[in-house]
Image: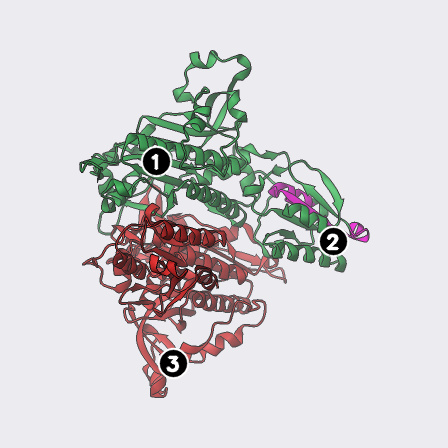
Chain colours: A red, B green
């Protein structure tokens, strides 16, 4: 993408009302624009990051055997009356009446709707296990939306729902999601720690939040330092195998959010292993058995011919929130430092003297070579001052920068910079291309 | 995807309340499920088609120079008061109050919101031309939603908005969209005819609907037969060139929707060239100049230093409606006949004797070869009767079918069937693979 044709409204000043660094940087880099309290437009740069995260989530969900679909944003109030949550959900539910005065709502989550889909089609245990997921916008009418996309009202969530005949099978489904989440967050460059959590309005008796540590995290969390260094299961994990050991490798260590914190257990740890920090919730998984299937009569026939309510779990990832969470976890004083897998563009090319024939030609040639290799580079072809270009490129945080100027071209070199380390190396354009393509 | 692990709730009966063939077939193939009047879940098979169409639209929009972003579904009422449309829009607008009694609405279109984004950032003609688009769910509270996704209430639309300094530049932007639309619809296997149309609540003085012909179309349309055979401009079109000739090649022929129909002009055509048919609107483009920029004060500085309201157009494609539209245009008595580019899976493999070692091995090997080639095949590995498998595969309409059974394997052959023609050929599995991969 040539910057002169792009829409990248970067601003120098940090907006006064943005309290945390991710919110400030998303506004300064023109990733988002607020359209109302807790409601945002995703401008082109921000949208690209959102899509990268969505795609990683999709790939890891698919790898685990879950099947993608899409439920609507609006739901019928009557469905929620079946589960008893229509009244119970409170003010965070956005209630709507249509032109015929029918009661609807903007879905804050989808347990009822997916249970309704399930009961319409699935009648036998032979159709199980089943895990259906979607990535759709949700609305929760937070009393005080804040922190940009970290606590917005309209937000993008991936929510998956598992269906099994027995509790044992349902717990297997839970473990598959547990492992898929570890892989997905790891691919995004995050260390997400599963912590025993309160089940809240979703219900159930087993639940883990996936938490990334960040000074600006909204809640206090407590865990064993050992958890910080455990590698993700890896993309070659066989999801049909027994995943108990992988899950227990983590759950055997102490880790809890504030609501579930047990000070005595925590203080039993050696002091050096006690991590008391702030955390950002990026995922939340639940096993809740028949909480919805029983009142909504979602039953399947077992091998013995008996009809039994299906065992369910649900599994959320805060896709739009992750954009902010990743910035909280990965930035420096110059701006964002995108992990490679979620960067809006993998590389930026800076033309140090736009208008100079040799510089223009060398930049265009490199840009085209990236395009041929299937890589979308961001090419700063503007005629602005070098200092401003460097600062902007650092601010938007692309993993690699290639600077092309007249002095280097005399020696047939360009400068390759790694954003994360700041390391700069002179090399030929071909070598820089190879290095970035990895 | 192995069918035994998939969620494909196919049913034999056409539902009584589905009046048109696309609605019937989308329900029968388990592509969608109704969750409320005009509100649908996209089940896995339907979701795949929706994503294919969305991706074609994205590619052709990007090729034309438009830039993708994403606006939220909910908007503030005050923005619509600025343009004067808040009251004018009528009952189709879904009006909502949040917990603080603030007036919001579920966006039926986005002229106001994009104008608000534009005026916040763009101040100079040097930042133009600009075309921003998104693909987002919209809501229009139709009095009588019907025909499945063809006239739903919650629907997916691609809407693009162009911004230019002068009317002349804005008309160039209009022509770029005109050509991009022809390419996009052509890639979907559709002949979409641009017809002069009424501008309705969007406003403006220049507007074309893109119409596909189908017996079940909701409106009467009239056009010159010559239009049916004009090829699309092609994917190598240079969008920076003068596109006037391509547009006029079409606009010189008579074509109009009922509202704009001029019987005298139509009847001046030779009778053999008069096409009077039913049509489905799949796209609609508008040039409306300063209709929104003037009241909303979206002004840019021109080369002469004067501030002028920006010239705008908007450009819609009914992404979810297209799924139904394509089925209306491409089906037979056995089911859907997907054009290659939008098929949910390019090929289906039918195992004629699941459980037979040789059949299972041959099917699995072929399935794996497709996967290695990056092609997701649908593999019917169930133990149902052959007749039911054939009927289901025809119904879901994948472009190719490969049937593998014990008799063929004795001769080392499989049967390759082209869904569209019904043609069946025996060949080796390798040849069938090559043929499908094209």
Q: Are marks 3 and 2 on the same chain?
A: no
Which of discs 3 and 2 lies nearer the camera? The answer is 3
Closer to the chain start, of discs 2 and 1, is: 1
Q: Where is residue B39 in the image (x, y as percent from the top left)?
A: 43, 43
Q: Which of B255 and A258 is in front in this view?
A: B255
At x 22%, y 57%, the residue is A12
The N terminus of chain B sits in image quarter: bottom right
Left or right of residue B349, residue B222 in this image: left
Tell me the element at label 1.
strand
Q: What element carries label 2?
A: loop
Give the Cα separation between the discs numbered 2 and 1: 54 Å
**Could you tell whether A186 is left or right of B30 in the image?**
left
| Disc 3 to disc 1, C-alpha distance | 55 Å
Q: Report if residue B113 is visible in the image.
A: no
Q: Is residue B13 left or right of residue B115?
A: right
Kindly identify which residue carries mark 3: A225
Identify the magenta region.
Answer: B388-412
Mark 3 touching mark 1, by CB under 8 A?
no
Q: Disc 2 or disc 1, which is closer to the eye?
A: 1
Please tell me whether residue B16 belongs to the stretch shown in magenta.
no
Q: In x, y percent, where is residue A84?
A: 38, 56
For disc 2, the chain is B
Of B240 and A383, nearer the camera is A383
Query: Who's the residue at 33% across and 28% down the image?
Result: B200
Q: How many marks?
A: 3
Q: How crowded is mark 2: few (under 14 residues within 10 Å), some or many (20 or more)?
A: some
- What residue did someone put label 2 on? B353
Q: Which chain carries label 3?
A: A
**Residue beneath disc 1:** B314
């Amino acid at each position: 993408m040539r910057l002169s044709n792009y829409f990248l409204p970067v601003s120098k000043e940090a907006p006064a009302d943005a309290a945390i660094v991710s919110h400030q940087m998303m506004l300064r880099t023109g990733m988002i624009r607020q359209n109302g309290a807790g409601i945002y437009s995703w401008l082109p740069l921000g949208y690209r990051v959102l899509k990268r995260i969505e795609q990683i989530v999709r790939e890891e969900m698919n790898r685990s055997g879950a099947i993608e679909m899409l439920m609507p944003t609006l739901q019928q109030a009557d469905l929620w009356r079946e589960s008893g949550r229509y009244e119970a959900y409170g003010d965070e539910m956005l209630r709507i009446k249509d032109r015929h005065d029918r009661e609807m709502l903007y879905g804050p989550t989808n347990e009822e709707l997916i249970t309704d889909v399930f009961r319409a089609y699935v009648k036998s245990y032979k159709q199980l296990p089943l895990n259906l997921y979607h990535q759709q916008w949700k609305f929760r009418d937070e009393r005080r939306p804040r922190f940009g996309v970290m606590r917005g009202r309209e937000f993008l969530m991936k929510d998956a729902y598992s269906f099994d005949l027995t509790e044992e099978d349902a717990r297997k489904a839970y473990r598959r999601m547990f492992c898929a989440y570890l892989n997905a967050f790891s691919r995004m460059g995050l260390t997400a720690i599963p912590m025993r959590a309160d089940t809240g309005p979703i219900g159930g008796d087993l639940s883990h939040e996936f938490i990334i540590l960040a000074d600006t995290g909204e809640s206090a969390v407590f865990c064993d330092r050992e958890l910080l260094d455990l590698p993700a299961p890896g993309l070659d994990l066989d999801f049909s195998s027994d995943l108990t050991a992988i899950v227990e490798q983590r759950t055997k260590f102490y880790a809890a959010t504030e609501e579930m914190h047990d000070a005595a257990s925590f203080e039993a740890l050696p002091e050096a292993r006690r991590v008391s920090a702030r955390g950002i919730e990026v995922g939340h998984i639940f096993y809740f058995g028949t909480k919805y299937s029983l009142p909504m009569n979602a039953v399947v026939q077992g091998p013995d011919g008996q009809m039994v309510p299906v065992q369910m779990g649900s599994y959320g990832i805060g896709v739009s929130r992750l954009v902010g969470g990743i910035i909280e976890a990965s930035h420096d004083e110059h701006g964002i430092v995108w992990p490679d897998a979620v960067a809006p563009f993998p590389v930026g090319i800076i033309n140090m003297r736009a208008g100079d024939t040799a510089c223009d030609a060398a930049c265009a040639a490199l840009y085209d070579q990236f395009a041929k290799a299937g890589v979308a580079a961001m090419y700063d072809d503007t005629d602005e001052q070098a200092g401003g270009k460097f600062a902007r490129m650092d601010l938007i945080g692309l993993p690699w920068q290639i600077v092309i100027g007249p002095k280097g071209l005399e020696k047939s070199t360009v400068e390759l910079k790694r954003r994360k380390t700041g390391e700069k190396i002179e090399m030929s354009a071909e070598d820089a291309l190879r290095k970035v393509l990895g």
